[in-house]
Image: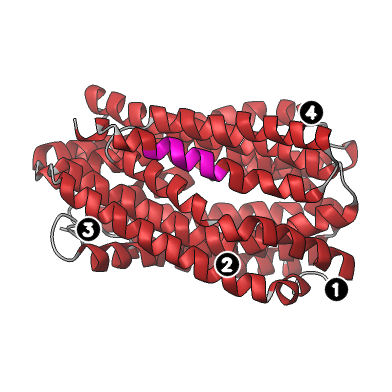
Amino acid sequence: MAKTLDLTQGSIARRLLLFAMPLLGASLVQQLYTTVDILFVSNFLGVEASAAVGASVLLNSALVNLFTGISIGAGVVIAQAFGRRDKVQLSKSIHTSMALGLIGGVLLTIVGELSASEFLRVVDTPESIFQDAFDYVEVFFLGLVFMLVFNMAAGVMRALGNSQTPMLIQLACGILHVVTNYLFIVYMENGILAVAWSSVLSQVLAAIISVCYLLKSGVMHTSKLAVDGPLTREIIRIGLPAGLQGVVVTLSNVFVQYFINGFDVVAIAAFTAYYRIELLFYMPLCALGQSMMTFAGQNVGARLYDRVKRGLRLTLGFGVGYSLVLAAILLYFGRETFGIFYSDPAVIDMGATIIWIAFPFYFFYVFLETFADTLRGAGLSVVPMYIVLFNQCLLRTAILFGFMQMAHDIRLLAAVYPITWGTAGAMLYWYYRKGTWMA
C-alpha cells in the first residue's frame, strides 16, 4: 500500500507537525502558481492582460471552491474508514471519491464553459478586455477535470496520512508551470492564452502523476471505480457545506473590497500589501487546521475521542504561539515589511496602522480554523458552515456598515477582522463543547 501515516498511534505532537509541514509546503507552491501568473502577465503582456485574468478570478474561485468542499467531505469519509480499520469501506470510499472527481470535473467544465460569457457580463467586464478574459476562461476550464481529479487524489493521500506526496507533485507541476509560462509567452507569443494553456498542462501532469501513484501503490484499481450511493450522500453531506462556505466567503469579499474602495488609493494599496503579508499567518494556520481535520477524522473513526481532544489542545497551542511570535516580529519590523511592497511613506504609514490593529489579535483566527476543521473531521460540517458564514459574511458586513456610518476611519475597517475572528471562534468553541461530534 502507499505510504501512510497512522495518526491514531504514537506521539500526537510529532505526527501532527510531520503531517502539517508538507501541507504548508503545498500551500506555498500554490501561492507560487498565482504569483508567477501575475508576474509574467504584468511584465510581458501589460495592464489590460492582467485585468483580463483578474476579471475571471471570481468565477474560477467560486467553482473550484465548491468542488474543493466535496474533496474535503471525501477526505473525512476516507480518514474515518481508515481509523476504523474498515478495509472494505475504505476501498469503496476511495473509488467513489475518485469517480466523483472525474464526473464532477466534467460537469463543472460544462457549467463553466456555458456560464463564462454571461458571468463576465454580470460583473461588468470592460469591453476592452472582454474577449481576452473570455478566451482565458474557456481554456482554463478545459483543465478543470484534471484539477479536480488531482484534488481528489491528493485528498485520498492526505486522508491516509500521506501529505508529502501531494506536495512533491505540486512542486514538480509548479516548476513546469513556470517554464511553460516563460516559453509560451516569450518565445511563442501566445498572449493571454499562454497563461491559460500553461495552467492546463500543469494540471494535466498533476492528475496523471497522482492517479498513477494511487494505481501503482495499490490504493486504487480502475476496475473498482464506481459511485456508491450511500457513500456519495455522506461525502456530499460533509463536503457540500464546506464548498458552499468557500463560495459565499469568496463572493462576500466583494463587499469588503467595496468599503476599502470607499477610501483613497493609499488605503487600497495598503490593504493590498496587508493581504500579502497576512499569508505569513494564514497559510501555516490553515495547514495546522487541515492536519487537525485528518487527525480528527482518523481518531473519530477509531473512537479515540480523548486523543482528538489532546490533539486539538496541542494544535491550538502551536497556532497561538506561532501567531503571537510572528505578530511581535511583524509589528516591530512593520514599516520595513511594507517597504518591500511600496516606497510611498503614506502607504507604509497606513499599512503600519492596519497591522497594529489586526495582527495582535490574529490568534483569534487560530480558534476559528482549528475548531471548524476539527468538527469537519468528525463529520459535522453544516453548523460550522452556518457559524462561519454568519460571522465572516453577515456580521462582518453589518459591522462594517455600522462602523462606516460612525466614522470614515481606516482603523474601524481594520478592526472588523479581529472582531469577527473572535466571535466565530467563540461560537465554534461553544458548538465543540456541546460534544455532538462524539455521538
| Disc 2 residue crowd, few under 14, some 14–19, many 20+, Cα 10 Å | many
Q: Where residue 216 is drawn, which disc sits there?
A: 3
* Marks 4/3: CA–CA distance: 46 Å
> Does the CB distance between marks 1 and 2 fall below 8 Å?
no
What secondary structure is marked by label 1? Answer: loop
**Mark closest to the chain's N terminus, 1 or 3:** 3
Q: Nearer the viewer, mark 2 or mark 3?
A: 2
Question: Reading the chain from its start, which is encountered first: label 4 or label 2?
Answer: 4
Range covered by the magenta-colored residues: 421-429
Query: How many numbered callouts?
Result: 4
Q: Tell me the tag on residue 327.
A: 2
Task: Say which amino acid is labelled 2.
Answer: Ala
Q: In this rendering, which labeled residue sits more in front, label 1 or label 3?
A: 1
Q: Nearer the viewer, residue 268 or 403?
A: 403
Q: Is residue 177 magenta?
A: no
Q: Which residue is mark 4?
A: 121
Residue 75 % position (x, y): 31, 43
Name which of mark 1 and mark 4 comes first in the sequence: 4
Closer to viewer: mark 4 or mark 2: 2
Q: Position of residue 112 (x, y in %)?
A: 60, 32
Q: Earlier in the sequence, mark 1 or mark 2?
A: 2
Q: Are marks 2 and 3 in contact (CB under 8 Å)?
A: no
- From this view, report whether residue 296 is shown above or below residue 361: above
Which residue is rendered at x = 39% and y = 52% of the image?
A: 289
Distance (Cα) linking label 2 and label 3:
45 Å
Q: Which residue is mark 1?
A: 343
Mark 4 vs 3: CB contact within 8 A: no
| Residue at x 33% of width, y 63% of height | 165
In percent of width and height, residue 385 lies at 45, 31
Circle 4 crowding by C-alpha within 10 Å: few under 14, some 14–19, many from 20:
few
